Image: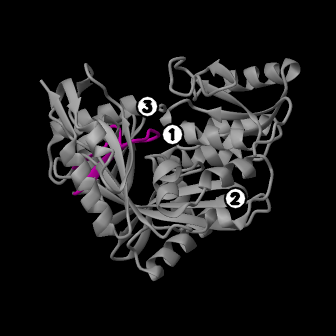
Amino acid sequence: MIMKIKNEFFWVIGGGMLQIPLIEEVKKLGYKVIVSDKNKKCVCYKNADIFFKIDIYDIPKHIETAKRFEKSKGRISGVLAAGIDAPETMATLAKKLGLPSVEPKIAHLVNNKEKFRTKLKKLNYPVPKFKVISKNNLKNLEKIIKDIGFPLIIKSSNSSGSRGTRIFCDSNLKEIKKTVKLAMYYSRSDLAIVEKCWEGSEHTVETIFDVNGNFHPCFITDRNFDKKNGYALEVGLEHPTSLSMKDQKQMYKLAKKVAVDLGIKIGAAKYDMMLTKNGPRIIEMTCRLSGGFDSQYLVPAATGKNVLKVAILIALGKPFPKNLLIDKKQKVGVTGSIWPKPGKILNIKGLDKAKKIRGYENIFFRYSKGDTVVEYVDSTKRVCWIISIGNTLNEAKKSLDKITNTIQIKTV
């Protein structure tokens, strides 16, 4: 039964498809929902009780709008950014409203790769050899490349979805410089990072701190990448992880220690980690829940865990039932995509038939008929995401293969 809480609102930052299940969970708790997004045509526009047309990165506008809203319309009881790269906006807005959240300075630190790298190094955690590139030292790029060595990877300092990311195994100064400029373009701070490449398997490690500051492991998902063209193209997820319990415990131990050393006492601490021959290493970290349909769809489908509700209750300053983080289903879930040739989409066939395949769970399209598929240079260029479920990893993968082979996307 859904409770109705008069004039109490929960603010969801971002209006994309990953916020749909978040909004649904908030409404089940009886709160009205405020959504902020710069796109009034976003998919969550109709799901919101109140919609504000604000860029998710515009912190002053969020604060100004929230204060004006509370004077006339009702009380804001919680603020959350989940599956969207706006933890700084979330933290600062919550702080101004006196609501539970991570400290803004911590959200800012982990949301800027170069600052996070520097802080980890200061705390004596392993970090790859790296150099920050700005317009001022771009002229020294060739010298910087020689100092870093190969293989190296170029990244934007504070963007997501692998935008502006590329791996180089040998010297190609022209392409490296082009990629650095692209990474700077995608970065809100106009900075790029050149760093030494680690080698190993990649994983999402999701953890959270409750209202009393207690640490809770949530889940680990395995991430599969296609790096043959140098791009860090995530092609699928597998949940639960295939890592040994020993490796999982090491990752959770590292996640907790880093979060505590940074001063995190409440909210999400989500990591991209790599398991190297020397043990787990942190690639990136953020103070929000994972994106990529992981905590929103894949994990609930495979396990029944409800990490979204956990995060919502924490943002409201409330405790959460432990059963929300228990695997009740004991299934295996995988995600994948269809990769049509770049070009204009003429038609999409076989969708209805694919949905009837055993193991089918969900499909989410970014493109539709008439849209143009571009070159797959980062993880945001995928046409769709497909989720399938099975009793084993092999069963889930077979289901996914059947689905992807059934759906035909013709481009020209």
Work out whether mark 2 precedes mark 3 in sequence or the reverse, and give the earlier one: 3
Question: What's the distance in space between the residues labelled 1 and 3, CA to CA?
Answer: 27 Å
The tag on residue 225 is none
- Whether residue 257 is visible to the viewer of this picture, yes or no, is yes
Please, what is the three-letter code of the amino acid marked with disc 1? Answer: Leu
In-front residue for pair 227/354: 354
Q: The residue tagged with tag 2: helix, strand or loop? A: loop
Q: Nearer the viewer, mark 1 or mark 3?
A: 1
Query: Looking at the image, is 166 positioned above or below residue 370?
Result: below
Task: Tell me residue 365's x, y (percent).
Answer: 35, 34
| Image quadrant containing the C terminus | top left
The label nearer to you, 1 versus 2, is 1
Disc 2 designates what residue?
Answer: 263
Label 1 secondary element: helix
Q: Picture coordinates of residue 180 (x, y %)?
A: 30, 37
User: What x and y, as percent, mark residue 261?
Assistant: 65, 64
Q: Magenta segment, which residues?
A: 151-167
Of mark 1 and mark 3, the one earlier in the sequence is 1
Q: Which mark is residue 190?
A: 3
Report the residue marked by disc 1.
Answer: 18
The residue shown at (62%, 46%) is: 107
Tell me the colour scheme of the image.
one colour
Whether residue 146 is visible to the viewer of this picture, yes or no, is no
Mark 3 element type: loop
Determine which quarter of the picture holds residue 378: top left
